[in-house]
Image: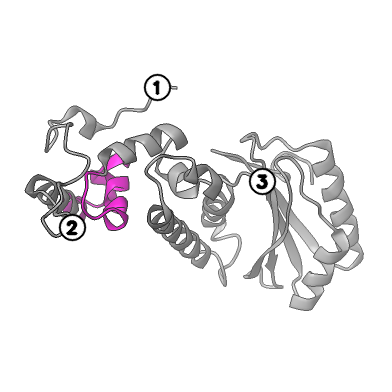
Amino acid sequence: MARIRHFSDTQPALFDADEAPAAPPRPDGRTTQPSYIRDHRARLRDRFLVGGAEALPDYELLELLLFRAIPRQDVKPLARLLLDRFGDFNGVVSAPLPRLEEVSGVGRAVITELKIVQAAAQRLAQARVLRKPVVSSWDALLDYCQTSMAHDDIEQFRVLFPDRKNVLIADEPQARGTVDHVPVYPREVLKRALELNATALILVHNHPSGDPTPSQADIEMTTQIQRAADSLGIALHDHLVIGKSRELSFRAEGLL
């Protein structure tokens, strides 16, 4: 698939593309950072501070992130390699550890930086929906689900618990499964809802294949939970299936 070109890709590069991959060693065995790499990093940071993330294409934003993990060499080739492998910035940051470890040049320091950013993004997205009315924060809730689940390589199932005022009081993972299946136990879901005094449920699970179309097993499981919830006076607001770039709502599709 051809890489989407950004506006900045058409502009003159700050430095030639053949920047050295590493600085020569000093007599004491340590390496110094060449001035052209220092200047490149300083200018990139300034552009980010002035224009924000919108001023940078994915590979430059990824470079900024890699600066901390790899302090004394050009990181542009690694940024390009990661984007070629995982598609975009979000795909790189969300990539599973085993797949990141397969990439030449990616060590523990790089993985740590990537996963810190992923965790921060998930916390920020979650903060926009927890303790907020579900109706007024629905778009933020969808963004949160995409951020936390869209790039997972195995299925996970989580439940969001609104209270009687429709304020989201809890967001909890219930199970993790395989690439195409996750075990769900309706009794455990309803037990937890009663423990939290929740009066409604929003079910969420992801499809690692990227296609959010629900399977027959998804539909049957949802029906089981709905029947159990109805018997306890608990409403099932929706079941969201998260794909790579879009989500599917059971309610919007007439499945609830």
Magenta span includes 115: no
Name the image quarter holding residue 2: top left
Q: Position of residue 79 (x, y in %)?
A: 33, 40
Q: Amino acid at mark 3?
A: Ile
Amino acid tagged 2: Arg
Mark 1 surroundings within 10 Å by alpha-carbon count, few (fewer than 14), some (14 through 19), many (20 or more): few
Q: Residue at x 21, y 34 (%)?
A: 8
Q: Which residue is mark 3?
A: 154
Residue toward you, 3 or 225? 3
Q: Please identify, in this view, whether the residue under mark 1 or under mark 2 is nearer the observer.
A: 2
x then y, percent, for residue 210: 61, 36
Tell me which corner region of the image, top left, top right, bottom left or bottom right, holds residue 138: bottom right
Q: Main secondary structure of the magenta part?
A: helix
Q: Which residues are magenta?
A: 47-74
The residue that mark 1 highlights is 2
Q: Secondary structure at mark 1?
A: loop
Residue for point 33% across, 35% down: 80
